[in-house]
Image (cartoon, rainbow, N blue to C red):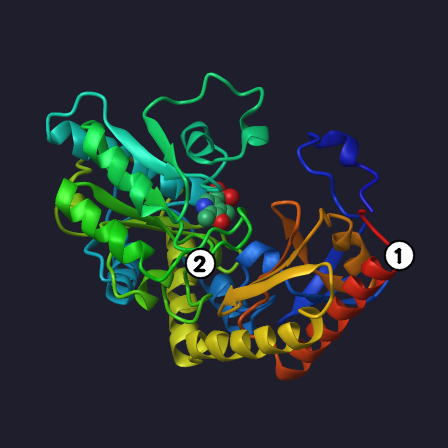
Amino acid sequence: MGQDTQYLMHTYSRLPVAFERGSGALLWDAAGDCYLDALGGIAVVGLGHAHPELADVIADQAHTLLHCSNLYDVPLQSQLGKRLCEVSGMDRSFFGNSGAEANETAIKLARRYGHGRGIDIPEVLVTEGAFHGRTLATLTATANRKAHAGFEPLVSGFKRVPFDDLNAVCRVASDNPNVVAVLVEPIQGEGGINIPDSGYLTGLREICDRQGWLLILDEIQTGMCRTGKWFSYQHDGVVPDVLTVAKALGNGVPIGACLARGEAAEVLLPGTHGSTFGGNPLACRVALTVIDILERDRLADRAAELGSRILKMLEQRLAPRPMVRSVRGRGLMIAVELDRPCGQLVSQALEQHLLINVTAETVVRLLPPLVISDEEVMMLVDRLTVTIDNFQANGNGK
Ligand SMILES: *Cc1c(COP(=O)(O)O)cnc(C)c1O
C-alpha cells in the first residue's frame, strides 16, 4: 500500500489495506482478497459499490455534459430539487458538494432568517455529541473538543445543550432571545448512534413553533432510506423547516443539499449564497438515479427489515457477552456498544475481512449498503461475533 503517502497530509491514520474494486457490499484488495463492507464508506454507498445502472448513467452524462455553471438554467438540478422536495416535504433546495457545505448553508440561512426578524446576533442551538462537519462553522457546531483543539477562535453564534433533553431547550428558550434555530441530528451518528426518546423531535418541533425558531435536521447520515424511511424524521411524523442531506445522495459522487420549507425556503436570495460545482449536471443526474433506484427497489423497506433482523441476531449472540453494554439501531444504522474503548476492533475485524467502524470510543458502528444480501447479513453477524469474542477472550482493554 501507498508508498507515496509521504505526499499526503497526515489527516488520517489509515488501515493497511487498499481496495481496487467493489461490487454491492463486497470489496477486493490488490491481492484479490474479498472483504465484506459493513460500513459503506460511512453511509455513502447505499446502493453498494459499482452499481451497474449508476455506472452507465455516469458514463452517459460524462459524454453529454458535466458542468456548465449556475449562471445558467440547469434542468437536471431543477428535476432533482423537485424529486427531493417530493420525498421530504420541503419546498426548495440548494446544492453543494458535501455534508459540511449543506450544513454551512443551513447555518447561513438561519442567521439570515434571524436578521430578517430583527435579531442582530442570531444564535443556533446545537447539542452535546453532535457531528456536523469540519469547516469552521460546522466544526463549531460539532461537539467534539478534540476536533476543536488548535482551531480556535471558533465561530461565535452557537449555544450547546445536552442531546435528547427538551427541558434544557426550554430553559434556553426562556432566557435567550437571540436563538433563531435548533440544529440537530435525528439520530447522532459520529456521537455513537444515539437514538433519542420518541417524543424528542415532536417536542423540538413544538418549541420551535412556539418560539419562531427554525428546526434544522441534519440527515446527512440518517437520510436516503438508511433508517427505513426516506428520512428519519418521518418515523416521528414531524417535518423540519430546514433539512440537510449528503452522503448517500450521490452514492460516492460528491453532492450535498440543503432543503427548506415555508418562510425558510425564501430566505436565500440572489447573491446571498452560491457554489461553483454545486448541483452540476453529473451530480444531479446521479442523485436522480439514486432516488429512482431506492424507490423502485423498495430499499427503505429492505433497510427496515434487514435492520430488525440484524438487531435480533446481534442481541441473541452478543447481548449475553459481559462486555457488551447495548445493541441498538434503526434500519441499517446499527451500534454495538461495549463497556470499554474498543478502537482495536476495527483492525481485528479487518483480519476477519469485515469492514466496520468504532465511534465515540466504545461504539461499533455498522452502516452497510442497503443492497446487502441475506447471505452477506449472516456473514456480517458471524464475523462480528467472532471479532468481539476474540477481543473478549484476549482480555482486551481492562
Ligand atoms: C458526515 C456527516 C457530516 C459531514 O459531511 P461531509 O460530507 O464529510 O462534509 C455532517 N453531518 C453528519 C450527521 C454527518 O454524518
Query: In the depicted view, which residue is nearer to us: 266 or 54?
Result: 266
Q: Position of residue 90 (x, y in %)?
A: 22, 57
Q: Residue at x 16, y 39 (%)?
A: 267
Disc 2 marks which residue? 222
Relative placement, left or right, of 91 versus 376 is left
Indicate yes or no: mark 2 CB to ligand 1 under 8 Å.
yes
**Outermost residue to the bottom:** 374
- Residue 394, disc: 1
Q: How many marks?
A: 2
Q: Position of residue 142 (x, y in %)?
A: 46, 36
User: From where the camera sits, is residue 240 visible?
Assistant: no
- Would you place residue 148 above or below residue 96 in this image? above
Q: Position of residue 7 (x, y in %)?
A: 74, 30
Q: Residue at x 44, y 29 (%)?
A: 140
Q: Amino acid at mark 1?
A: Asn
Q: Nearer the viewer, mark 2 or mark 1?
A: 1
Q: Residue at x 73, y 39 (%)?
A: 13
